[in-house]
Image (tube, rainbow, N blue to C red):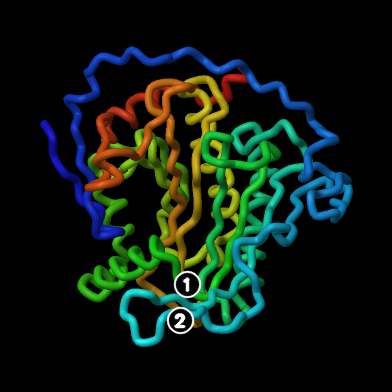
Amino acid sequence: MPHRRYNPLTDSWVLVSPHRATRPWQGQVEKLPPENRPPYDPSCYLCPGNVRANGAQNPDYQDVFVFDNDYAALLPQAEKEYECPEGSPFFRAKPERGMARVLCFSPRHDLTIPEMSAAAIRRVVDIWISEYQTLGEYPFIHYVQIFENKGAIMGCSNPHPHGQIWAQESIPDEPLKKQKAQQKYWEENGRTLLSDYLKEELVLGERILFELEDFVALVPFWAIWPFEAMIVPRRAMARITELSDKEKDGLAEAYRRLTILYDNLFETSFPYSAGIHQAPTDGAEHPEWHWHFVFYPPLLRSATVKKFMVGYEMLANSQRDITPELAVEWLRKADRAHYKQT
């Protein structure tokens, strides 16, 4: 029956309506044609040696490659105060300094994370850590957001495998919600919120996708997107900079394994937005933080049917039909080897 589920990380609710999953569907459910991208595309502005849209030329890189975003949403220069009507409580704005970086995962134009080796993904993890440290050392940078948009359906402007890193003065809204919730839980219990949550999920086993020695992949109890998932380290750490070498390898393998399950579900290059939520870079220790990797994929019934946040979701509350438990069941049945390799 319809019920609401609470998300303690963001102090918010999601409406779950399982009975709606049986409603008739007359939309298209066919598979998409396979993508046949070449290993190198001379017109791609992220491929090695190519000239980007702003005239800069990429080096002939053979591994990961990171550079300043040519059209960054954040700039390091501080402008004058944004002009608003003086004394009004309704019109408030302030300058926001920051930096934005692009990280090419591979020189290969035709590869995505689930098609890369764990060793190659480990080099991506190393760059994440290096960039988090470097950007976080700027005095005016208080938060570093690492993320990936995969697929045109998620607004990805280039199919070359890449992610982004945005660093800014303020703590953005979503991490700030988690900051407040985790701080409250830590003060009341002396343990991280996700440590206790993970223990209970492991006992129940209903929403666990797979377990590795140092990481657990699961569909959270409060998931909003149909096949939303999290990768959570077993050891409580505020930041990815605290990872041991073995844990870095484990994160790369978990990233690879989860995205293979996604691709195999509908035998398509599964779109998603994913990112790492971790402690701010404001100089504080933040023992309340337990960093985690979140995945928000939009697909619902097939490679061509997308979940849209419209109507009630936009006007009232997040809502889902397929329960997290059913989503786990479907993902668990997916093959462990990528469908293109079988």
Picture residue at 65% right of the left edge, 65% below the top: 131
Q: How many marks?
A: 2
Question: Which disc is residue 280 wearing?
Answer: 1
Q: Residue at x 88, y 47 (%)?
A: 60
From the viewer's perspective, is residue 184 above or below residue 339?
below
For image coordinates 60% across by 66% down, the residue present is: 74
Task: Please state the horizontal and vertical placement of residue 180, each as a whole percent of the image.
Answer: 31, 70
Q: Nearer the viewer, residue 127 or 2?
A: 2
> Where the C terminus falls, by quadrant?
top right
Q: Which of pointers 2 and 1 indicates the residue nearer the eye?
A: 1
Query: Residue at coordinates 40% horizontally, 76% vertically from top-left?
Result: 92
In the rendered image, which quarter is residue 140 located in?
A: bottom right
Residue 138, visible in the rendered structure: yes
Distance from the alpha carbon under mark 2 to that under mark 1: 8 Å
Residue of label 2: 284
* Residue 70 pos. (x, y %): 73, 58
Classify residue 62 as left or right of residue 18. right
